[in-house]
Image (spheres, rainbow, N blue to C red):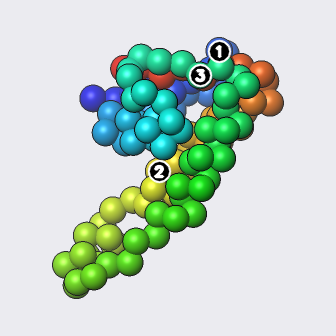
Amino acid sequence: MLVNFSYINGQKISMFEKDAQSMLKVMEMSGNIPGAMNPEDIPAAINLIKHASSISTVQPVTAEDAKAKDDSVSFKNRAFPLVELLNMAVKKNQSVMWEYE
């Protein structure tokens, strides 16, 4: 299932539910869908995602782990569109909402 993140009259991004819930947990949200975040809470959420992105470089242990890592999308790359959306919402002083598509 897909989850849409958006703000009023702004950009919308979609993520698979598992990835969206992971991002919500990193931002210290409940993980419930639907949900929303007030404008004043967004800068802290951005910092939490950036911090998680900086420490999410786990080194593969085996050749099989390395292959799986090569086939996967990193947390940092997966988080990039959400961070951009959050930054735009901050500039426009908008709440960010998420809901199932």
Mark 3 and mark 2: Cα distance apart in space: 20 Å
**Neighbour class for label 3 at 10 Å: few (<14), some, many (≥20)?**
some
Please report contact status of discs 3 and 1: CB closer than 8 Å, yes or no: no
Q: Residue at x 71, y 37 (%)?
A: 43
**Camera-side mark, 3 or 2:** 3
**Neighbour class for label 1 at 10 Å: few (<14), some, many (≥20)?**
few
Say which amino acid is labelled 1: Ile
Q: Is residue 25 left or right of residue 42?
A: left
Rendered location of residue 93, percent (x, y)? 77, 22
Q: 45 and 63: which one is in front?
A: 45
Q: Which residue is mark 3?
A: 37
Mark 3 and mark 1: Cα distance apart in space: 12 Å
Q: 1 and 48: which one is in front?
A: 48
Identify the secondary structure beneath mark 2: helix
Q: Residue at x 54, y 58 (%)?
A: 53
Q: Quadrant of the C terminus?
A: top left
In the displayed structure, would residue 80 be above or below residue 4?
A: below
For residue 24, say whether it is visible: yes
Q: Which residue is mark 1?
A: 8
Q: Is residue 4 left or right of residue 81?
A: left
Say which amino acid is labelled 3: Met
Which callout, 2 or 1, points at the residue further toward the start of the chain? 1
In the displayed structure, would residue 53 be above or below residue 98?
A: below
